[in-house]
Structure formats: C-alpha cells, structure tokens
Amino acid sequence: MYKNIKVDFEKFMQVIDKCEKDIFIITAEGDKFNMKSKLSQLVALGTLFKNGQIEIDHLETTCAADDSRVFRFLIYGEVERE
C-alpha cells in the first residue's frame, strides 16, 4: 500500500491501463475507488484532481505484477512500454 502520493494524471492513467488486476484509491474520508473502472475513474478524479496532478491518500494493488508497475512509476516516473 502506498500513501500520500502526488502523480501526473496522464502518466498515472497509462500505468493503470497496463495493470492486470484492480487498483484501488482510498480517500481520507474512506471512499474506495477501483481505478480499473472507467466510472470510478471519473468520480474519483473529480475529487482528487488538483493543479494538473492527482493527490492520493492511499493506493492499493491486488497483484504483485501490478504492485511492481506502480512502484516503478512512483519511484522512477517510468511507464512500461509495450
């Protein structure tokens, strides 16, 4: 689980699209959004989007491969190429 993250929206969504399983964003209020769902993306981003970035309180992955993708993105800013 990752906490208190600020990321570039466009790159973050590229990483999410490459993930195999569910990725959840959990707000400070306890709302949980599945970022693999387009509807959840719209609702969550309306709440989290600030100054061209999204601010995430908690981020949870459900798959080790996805955890690795997200970790690599958060540390190095890299989006996997196909």
Image (cartoon, rainbow, N blue to C red):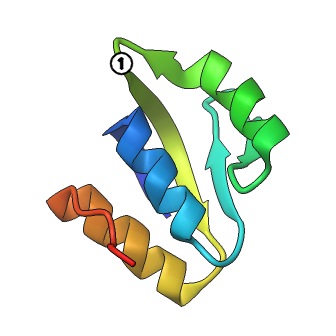
- Mark 1 is surrounded, within 10 Å at the Cα level, by few (under 14), some (14 to 19) or many (20 or more) other residues, namely few
Image quadrant holding the C terminus, namely bottom left
Secondary structure beneath label 1: loop
Q: In the rendered view, would you say 11 is above or below 62? A: above
Q: Position of residue 26 (x, y in %)?
A: 65, 43
Q: Position of residue 80 (x, y in %)?
A: 33, 72
Question: 56 or 79: which is nearer to us?
Answer: 79
Q: Position of residue 1 (x, y in %)?
A: 50, 64
Seen at 52% across and 87% down, the residue is: 64
Question: 57 or 45: which is nearer to us?
Answer: 45
Q: In the rendered view, would you say 49 is above or below 34? A: above
Amino acid identity at mark 1: Gly
Q: Position of residue 3 (x, y in %)?
A: 42, 49
Res 21 quadrant in image: bottom right
Is residue 79 found left or right of 56 in the rendered image? left
Is residue 28 found left or right of 2 in the rendered image? right
* Residue under label 1: 52
Q: Residue furthest front?
A: 82
Res 77 quadrant in image: bottom left
Is residue 34 found left or right of 16 in the rendered image? right
Q: Residue furthest bottom?
A: 64
Seen at 55% across and 58% down, the residue is: 16
Seen at 53% across and 47% down, the residue is: 58
Q: Residue furthest right?
A: 39
Is residue 79 found left or right of 33 in the rendered image? left
Q: Residue furthest top?
A: 51
Res 4 quadrant in image: top left
Q: In the rendered view, would you say 32 is above or below 43? A: below
